[in-house]
Image: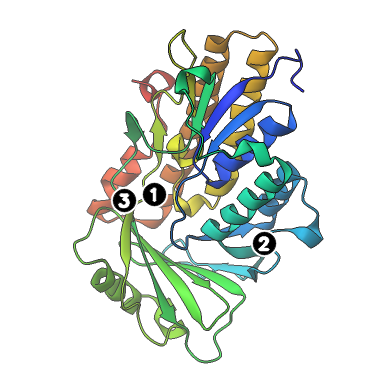
């Protein structure tokens, strides 16, 4: 039960890791949750380090033997070559799991509804005004986006005798490439480029041909997608309830999106879920909602500034091409007053 013993009603709209984790925390604290899952989507591959997996299991009170990622493909090492003119780093011991994010979310949703069967009532109409809060990761409203870069992604067959337990990061003059074995004789190849491209598969193949990773694949990806991947922050990720409308807390990528190079996007999404649940819980204890929303927003703005500073440092070390200049400048450290402007 919440500290003041007054349960809050929250609508959780979505079924990603952030939304489900927030719902789980609220239900465990005695609040009422109306869960509105999204329709199932296609596979969504994630590379989750053991620290992130430990955080997920802790938040869901899941033991190692019952982990919903127990059947995932395990990686043991990462091999990176980032700075031009230097030798590649030796393989680093970086245990991780290759996980289908959609399947993982489905398993967590099943776990949630088994324990709290009254939380999911999608066939029962509800009055949105009766809810105190809405929690969602769905994109909405205005964002500050730091750059134009896109990630290209496609699957391809591995070459014979390829190491299936090591993720590899390489760079060319104008892109970085990441190869992630999937454990079934194929690998996911990703490339970050400084802007949108017209033909993702063709562009990805050209980048691969100039990379040492080419020898690790039997062929380039036959198809590929291009997705926006620049860091992004919602300008108002938290708004307090009013007499006529519930408050809104954006979580996950709906609130803040990290550059994939950081490898911490899922962990950050889980942190937004924890913070959003704490905001709602604290309103039940009597803390003014406007103060809590301001704190939530400030925490995300601070995280975003720190992330941009890290991106600026890493990209400046790797790329001198003019096409990357805009991305490096867009990822530079931003004065506090400018982030919310």
Q: How many numbered marks, from 0 up?
A: 3
Mark pair 3, 1: CA separation: 14 Å
Q: How packed is label 3: few (under 14 Cα within 10 Å), some, or many (20 or more)?
A: many
Q: Earlier in the sequence, mark 3 or mark 2?
A: 2
Q: Indicate the position of residue 117 as horizontal and vertical percent values.
A: 67, 41
Query: Residue 126 bears which disc, if any?
Result: none
321 vs 91, left or right, is left
| Front-lying residue, 198 or 102 | 102
Mark pair 1, 2: CA separation: 36 Å
Find numbered disc 3 in the image and state the secondary structure of the residue it sits on. Answer: loop
Find numbered disc 2 in the image and state the secondary structure of the residue it sits on. Answer: loop
Residue receiving disc 1: 316
Q: How packed is label 1: few (under 14 Cα within 10 Å), some, or many (20 or more)?
A: some
Question: Can you say whether 175 is above or below 213 in the image?
Answer: above
Asked if the residues shown at circle 3 and circle 2 are in contact, with their CB atoms under 8 angstroms apart, the answer is no
Nearer to us: label 1 or label 2: 2
Nearer to us: label 3 or label 1: 3
| Residue positioned 44% across, 15% down in the render | 245
Query: Residue 149 bears which disc, if any?
Result: 3
Q: Is residue 89 visible?
A: no
Q: Earlier in the sequence, mark 1 or mark 2?
A: 2
Q: Quadrant of the C terminus?
A: top left
Q: Earlier in the sequence, mark 3 or mark 1?
A: 3
Mark pair 3, 2: CA separation: 30 Å
Question: Can you say whether 264 is above or below 199 in the image?
Answer: above
Q: Quadrant of the N terminus?
A: top right
Q: Indicate the position of residue 68 as horizontal and vertical percent values.
A: 68, 59
Query: Residue 69 bears which disc, if any?
Result: 2
């Amino acid at each position: 039960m919440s500290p003041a013993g007054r349960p809050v009603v929250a609508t959780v709209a979505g079924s990603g890791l952030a939304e489900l984790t927030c719902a789980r925390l609220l239900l465990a604290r005695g609040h009422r949750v109306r869960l509105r899952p999204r329709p199932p989507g296609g596979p969504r591959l994630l590379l989750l380090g053991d620290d992130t997996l430990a955080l997920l299991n802790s938040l869901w009170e899941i033991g190692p033997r019952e982990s919903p990622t127990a059947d995932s493909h395990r990686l043991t090492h990462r091999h990176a070559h980032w700075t031009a003119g230097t030798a590649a780093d030796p393989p680093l011991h970086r245990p991780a799991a290759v996980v289908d994010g959609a399947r993982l979310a489905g398993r967590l949703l099943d776990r949630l509804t088994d324990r709290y069967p009254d939380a999911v009532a999608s066939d029962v109409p509800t009055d949105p005004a009766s809810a105190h809060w809405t929690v969602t990761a769905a994109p909405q409203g205005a964002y500050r986006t730091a750059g134009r870069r896109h990630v290209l992604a496609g699957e391809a067959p591995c070459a014979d005798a390829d190491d299936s337990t090591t993720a590899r990061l390489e760079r060319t003059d104008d892109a970085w490439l990441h190869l992630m074995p999937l454990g079934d004789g194929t690998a996911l190849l990703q490339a970050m480029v400084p802007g949108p491209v017209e033909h993702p598969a063709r562009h990805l193949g050209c980048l691969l041909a100039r990379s040492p990773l080419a020898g690790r694949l039997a062929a380039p990806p036959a198809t590929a997608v291009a997705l926006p991947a620049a860091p992004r922050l919602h300008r108002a990720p938290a708004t307090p309830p009013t007499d006529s409308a519930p408050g809104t807390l954006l979580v996950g990528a709906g609130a803040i999106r990290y550059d994939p190079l950081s490898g911490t996007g899922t962990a950050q999404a889980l942190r937004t879920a924890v913070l959003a649940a704490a905001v709602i819980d604290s309103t039940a204890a009597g803390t003014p909602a406007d103060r809590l929303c301001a704190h939530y927003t400030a925490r995300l703005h601070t995280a975003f500034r720190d992330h941009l500073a890290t991106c600026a440092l890493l990209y400046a070390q790797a790329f001198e091409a003019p096409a990357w200049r805009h991305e490096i400048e867009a990822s530079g450290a931003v004065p506090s007053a400018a982030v919310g402007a």
